[in-house]
Image (cartoon, grey):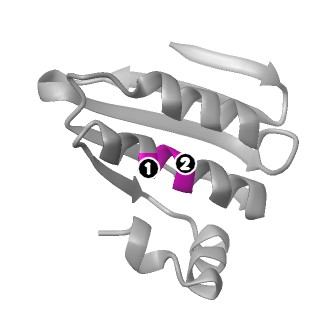
Amino acid sequence: MTHSTDPVLTITVAVAAGGHVVVRPAGEVDAATAPELLAALLGACSPQLTVLEVDMAGVAFLDSAGISALLAGRARAAEHGARFTVSNVQPVVRRVLDVTGLSETFLD
């Protein structure tokens, strides 16, 4: 499934076996697009969820609104007893996570 309400961000959600869901945003995650990411993360949560993975390979920019969306997604996954992880982080996004002290929270 692909969501696209803003041309700056597209989001693909893939459901794998065993309750593993991968959300793949591509583009910029900022104040204008973070609500779309948040909606995809919250929508991915279900009682069957075991892992909620956010594959950031296609994300070129992440601001505080994007970080808030990730934190809210992490909290919702935890409510379902699922593990939350962020993968394939690009250097520019890694710097944001490092500066905010969230690298250890999100990255394995």
* Picture residue at 58% right of the left edge, 75% below the top: 97
Q: Identify the residue under disc 1.
A: 75
Return the mark for residue 72.
2
Q: Quadrant of residue 48?
A: top left
Disc 2 marks which amino acid?
Ala
* Picture residue at 58% right of the left edge, 16% below the top: 2
Return the mark for residue 93.
none
Residue 62, x across and y down, in percent: 72, 60
Q: CB under 8 Å between callouts 2 and 1?
A: yes
* Picture residue at 19% right of the left edge, 27% below the top: 19
Question: Range of the magenta residues?
Answer: 71-75
Q: Quadrant of residue 67?
A: bottom right
Query: Residue 56 magenta-drawn?
Result: no
Q: How many discs appear?
A: 2
* Picture residue at 74% right of the left edge, 49% below the top: 29
Nearest the viewer among 41 and 15 is 41
| Residue 63 seen in the figure | no
Residue 86, x across and y down, in percent: 42, 56
Q: Looking at the image, is 92 positioned above or below residue 57?
A: below
Which SS does the magenta portion mostly show? helix
Q: Looking at the image, is 7 positioned above or below residue 86?
A: above
